[in-house]
Amino acid sequence: MPESRNRKIESPEAPGAIGPYSPAVRSDAGTHLFVSGQVGIDRKTGEFVSGEVTSQAEQCLKNLMALVRAAGGSRASVVKVNIYLESIDDFAAVNEVYARHFEEPYPARACIGGCQLPKGALVEIEAIAAL
């Protein structure tokens, strides 16, 4: 099997992986970045920023963007986002946070509620960026 030329991306501003995966992977062609699901954990403390969904969503997006920047991208590079919510009742609150982080044309997006998330997170966000 040929050796992968995909490159693992990490950032000192985002938490490391909590399992056997990379925080983000840049494709071997260097044109796409796949960011693993980010939860609202603060890199410095290793803990959730709060028990409140909007604070966790804000931190998820900070973590996600730290990885995008580490690969040389920007907010405009993000083309697809998936959001996972413990409760779909948090959809509107997370939308408000999300709207502060992206602008037109917004990335394509899916949002799924009713999820059991790692470490008891209330929200998890993953993305694909075109670099």
Image (cartoon, grey):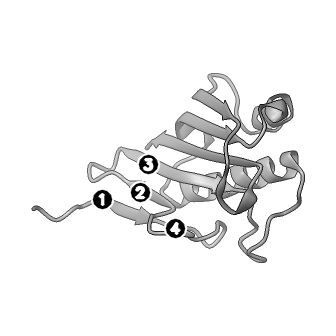
In this figure, which residue is indicated by the disc labeled 3? 33
Query: Crowding near pointer 1: few (<14 within 10 Å), some, many (20+)?
Result: few
Q: Are marks 1 and 2 in contact (CB under 8 Å)?
A: yes
Residues at marks 1 and 3, CA–CA distance in whole angstroms: 10 Å
> What's under tag 3, amino acid-wise?
Leu
Residues at marks 2 and 4, CA–CA distance in whole angstroms: 9 Å
Residue drawn at x 55%, y 38% is 78
* Mark 1 or mark 2, earlier in chain: 1
In this figure, which residue is indicated by the disc labeled 1? 6
> What's under tag 4, amino acid-wise?
Glu
> What's under tag 1, amino acid-wise?
Asn
Residue 15 x, y percent position in the rendering? 64, 69
Q: Are marks 3 and 2 in contact (CB under 8 Å)?
A: yes
Q: Is residue 73 left or right of residue 33?
A: right
Residue 79 x, y percent position in the rendering? 52, 33
Q: Nearer the viewer, residue 87 or 110?
A: 87
In this figure, which residue is indicated by the disc labeled 4? 10
Residues at marks 1 and 2, CA–CA distance in whole angstroms: 6 Å
In this figure, which residue is indicated by the disc labeled 2? 25
Q: Are marks 3 and 4 in contact (CB under 8 Å)?
A: no
Q: Quadrant of residue 95?
A: top right
Residues at marks 4 and 1, CA–CA distance in whole angstroms: 13 Å
Q: Are marks 2 and 4 in contact (CB under 8 Å)?
A: no
Give SS at disc 2.
strand
* Mark 2 or mark 4, earlier in chain: 4
Give SS at disc 3.
strand
- Please say if 32 is above or below 12: above
Quadrant, the C terminus: top left
Residue 103 x, y percent position in the rendering? 70, 29
